[in-house]
């Protein structure tokens, strides 16, 4: 990446420039909030995309929602490429992408990291704890890949909306005794991975149902979405202090308008000098004009990265084929593959042709 000269940073003004991490109890209305946010802000469902992940299919009853589904890391990579390139060539109008739910990404990417470890070390890897020699290196690779994935989409001008579930955890600060721990409502992700989203996302929200209990019976219940943390709720935003409320009640049939207003007021009130709503809207429109340029740059970077990855893949595939082509029958498969590809030398084969040979060797 080329060096970027220092410049004075300005508070962002569009939803595309926010990375939102929302976790709550099940059936809270997370996916519905995303659908309603797109319709409320843009009036067009094609401006948003909800990506269902793995075994989570929570959008079957959500009408007027633009959605797709991914099951493998290859699907994720193809989705990213389509989103970025499609934004440049006008194939779609997507502004914000939601991932539902983040919990389901982890087994998918851990499987990919195990595969990468097998290729790199030429040793079978069936556990993330063994990947890249163990000692947490597999988990570090997971974090590296995920941060890179979301950062590339964000730099291409997409708003990111990550959806997850909650869990009450006992937190023990480093240096304290177990009896000195405290309970907090946070993500159900392992602490190893939770930091990925808590660190790089701008808005970390937690939804809960606040129940009033009398004599062991619930007398009332109010859904609340927290923007700022409490002694029990883990939440927080990068807005200026008091720019957003502690929470909003989440009881309307459509909570999106209030939610959007809170976010936009948070951006506006985080500016070093007060501005009017009209001035903020003008800045918002100006910022929107830069989004397509962001996408063009990201598409170019992606093309260069794909070429680098392809070259690296060719080296890895050659090594793997050579390690397998040690018997006469395996050598015969290799020579047949070279001939079928219309090539005269092993070094002339493309990544796709090498994969075809490797598939034959693995049968």
Image: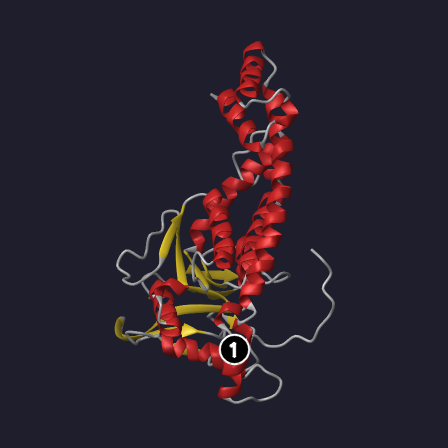
Residue 241, above or below 319: below
Q: Quadrant of residue 64?
A: bottom left
Q: Nearer the viewer, residue 258 or 304?
A: 304
Query: What coloring was used for the rendering?
Result: secondary structure
| Count of numbered labels shown in the rendering | 1
Q: Quadrant of residue 275?
A: bottom right
Residue visible at 61% across and 62% down?
Answer: 176
Residue 260 image offset from top left, x and y in percent: 42, 76
Residue extending farthest to the top is 328
Q: Is residue 66 left or right of residue 356?
A: left
Residue 52, above or below 290: above
Q: Which residue is mark 1?
A: 284
Residue visible at 33% across and 52% down?
Answer: 57
Q: Nearer the viewer, residue 242 or 67?
A: 67
Q: Is residue 359 left or right of residue 40?
A: right
Q: Quadrant of the N terminus?
A: bottom right
Report helix, strand or loop for mark 1: helix
- For mark 1, does the 10 Å Cα neighbourhood hold few (<14), some (14 to 19), or many (20 or more) residues? some
Q: Is residue 133 visible?
A: no
Residue visible at 35% across and 71% down?
Answer: 43
Residue 232 image offset from top left, x and y in percent: 47, 70
Q: Is residue 187 visible?
A: yes
Residue 343, above or below 254: above
Q: Quadrant of residue 135?
A: top right
Residue 15 image offset from top left, x and y in percent: 48, 71
Q: Nearer the viewer, residue 25 or 279?
A: 279
């Amino acid at each position: 990446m080329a060096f970027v000269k220092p410049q004075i940073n300005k508070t962002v003004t569009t939803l595309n420039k926010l990375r939102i991490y929302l976790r709550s109890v099940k059936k809270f209305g997370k996916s519905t909030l995303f659908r309603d946010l797109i319709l409320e802000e843009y009036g067009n469902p094609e401006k948003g995309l909800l990506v269902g992940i793995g075994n989570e299919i929570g959008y079957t009853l959500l009408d007027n929602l633009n959605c797709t589904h991914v099951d493998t890391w290859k699907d994720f990579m193809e989705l990213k490429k389509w989103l970025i390139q499609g934004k440049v060539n006008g194939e779609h109008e997507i502004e914000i992408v939601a991932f539902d739910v983040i919990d389901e990404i982890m087994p998918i990417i851990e499987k990919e990291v195990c595969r990468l470890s097998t290729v790199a070390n030429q040793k079978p890897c069936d556990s993330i704890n063994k990947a890249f020699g163990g000692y947490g290196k597999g988990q570090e690779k997971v974090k590296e890949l995920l941060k890179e994935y979301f950062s590339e989409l964000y730099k291409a001008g997409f708003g990111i909306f990550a959806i997850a579930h909650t869990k009450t955890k006992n937190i023990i600060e480093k240096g304290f005794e177990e009896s000195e721990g405290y309970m907090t409502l946070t993500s159900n992700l392992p602490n190893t991975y939770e930091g990925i989203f808590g660190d790089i996302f701008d808005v970390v929200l937690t939804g809960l149902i606040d129940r009033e209990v009398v004599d062991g019976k619930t007398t009332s219940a109010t859904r609340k979405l927290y923007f700022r943390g409490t002694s029990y709720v883990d939440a927080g935003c990068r807005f200026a202090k008091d720019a957003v409320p502690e929470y909003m009640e989440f009881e309307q049939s459509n909570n999106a308008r209030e939610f959007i207003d809170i976010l936009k007021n948070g951006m506006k009130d985080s500016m070093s000098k007060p501005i009017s709503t009209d001035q903020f809207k003008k800045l918002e429109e100006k910022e929107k004009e830069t989004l397509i340029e962001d996408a063009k740059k990201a598409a170019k970077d992606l093309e260069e990265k794909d070429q680098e990855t392809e070259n690296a893949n060719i080296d890895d595939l050659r090594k793997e084929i050579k390690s397998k082509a040690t018997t006469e029958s395996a050598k015969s498969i290799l020579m047949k593959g070279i001939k079928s590809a219309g090539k005269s030398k092993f070094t002339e084969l493309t990544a796709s042709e090498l994969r075809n040979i490797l598939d034959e060797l693995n049968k």
